[in-house]
Image (cartoon, rainbow, N blue to C red):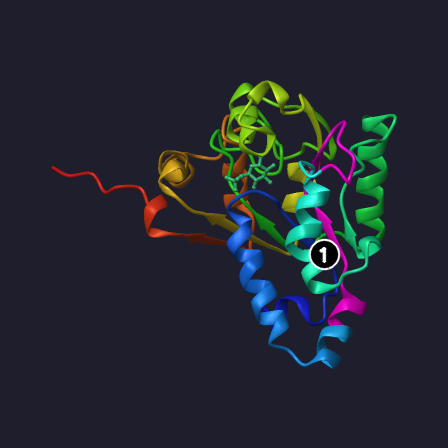
Amino acid sequence: MNTWIASPQRPLGLATGRTMEPVYGELVRRWQALPEGRREQLRQSWLSFNLDEYVGLAPADPRSFAAAMARQLGQPLGLHPDRLLLPDGLAADPAEEAEAYALRLQRAGGLGLQLLGLGLNGHVGFNEPPCGPGARCRCVQLSASTREQNAGAFGGDPAAVPERAISLGLHEILAAERLLLVVTGPGKAAILERLLREAPSDALPASWLRQHRDLTLIVDADALPVPATD
Ligand code: GLP
């Protein structure tokens, strides 16, 4: 952890979702073990950009990704909200907000290390299939499967999940220096198997990550594709 966040030349790219919860839990645990002077140094140099945010949710709304990040990282680490950035879900013009967010990221030097989870339909961020590697930060329409996948935070009701989100595109993600894709749980085994076996294509947006020169994949035993038996 220390080498990744100690002297970031470029901002960190962060993801939300259940996969990241234990990752952030461990980060907080290690952070708390550091001397206060070191923690303060890290606070001062912290700058992160999250992948996405739902359109229509305020940062104070507990279901927003901004609120999730504040709960999981911002508050426990004592980060200044201006250093833990997400697209503004309440922006009057989401398309304009997406452009402004991408510009802010570009001005900050682009992404250093980008953490990524994997959607059940192969999305990363909210880059829903079909999606090519040139897709830029934009306002996207969420698929029925994604709204179902994320319904947990909305009382289990997929219809309550916003229909749109602002998401960094594969373009910004693939321009990161390093990618760390974390895939956990039995529910991800089938999509992971496709990701590992299929040639990159727009039908599986995460497959474009395989063309990145510095991709690390972390998989737990439950998500590992079951080997074929004869
Ligand atoms: C979500 C998010 C992604 C996340 C992915 C996996 O919809 N937009 O950033 O990584 O889907 O979510 P989970 O980790 O909950 O399975």
Q: Position of residue 61 (x, y in %)?
A: 74, 36
Q: Tell me if 172 is positioned left or right of 30 in this view.
A: right
Give the residue drawn at x 72%, y 79%: 36
Quarter occupied by the N terminus? bottom right
Relative to 45, is 19 above or below? above
Give the residue drawn at x 53%, y 27%: 156
Front in this rendered view, residue 71 or 184? 71
Q: Tell me if 189 is positioned left or right of 179 in this view.
A: left
Front in this rendered view, residue 117 or 60? 60
Crowding near the residue tagged with mark 1, few <14, some 14–19, many ≥20 C-alpha atoms within 10 Å: some
Mark 1 lies on a secondary structure that is helix
Give the residue drawn at x 68%, y 32%: 135
Q: Position of residue 216 (x, y in %)?
A: 50, 55
Residue 159 can be seen in this image = yes
The residue range painted magenta reads 42-61
Q: Residue furthest left?
A: 230
Say whether residue 93 is magenta: no
> Which residue position holds label 1?
74
- The amino acid type found where label 1 is placed reads Gly
Q: Tell me if 97 is positioned left or right of 181 in this view.
A: right
Does mark 1's beta carbon lie closer than 8 Å to ligand 1? no
Q: Position of residue 8 (x, y in %)?
A: 72, 66
Residue 112 can be seen in this image = no
Q: Position of residue 6 (x, y in %)?
A: 69, 72
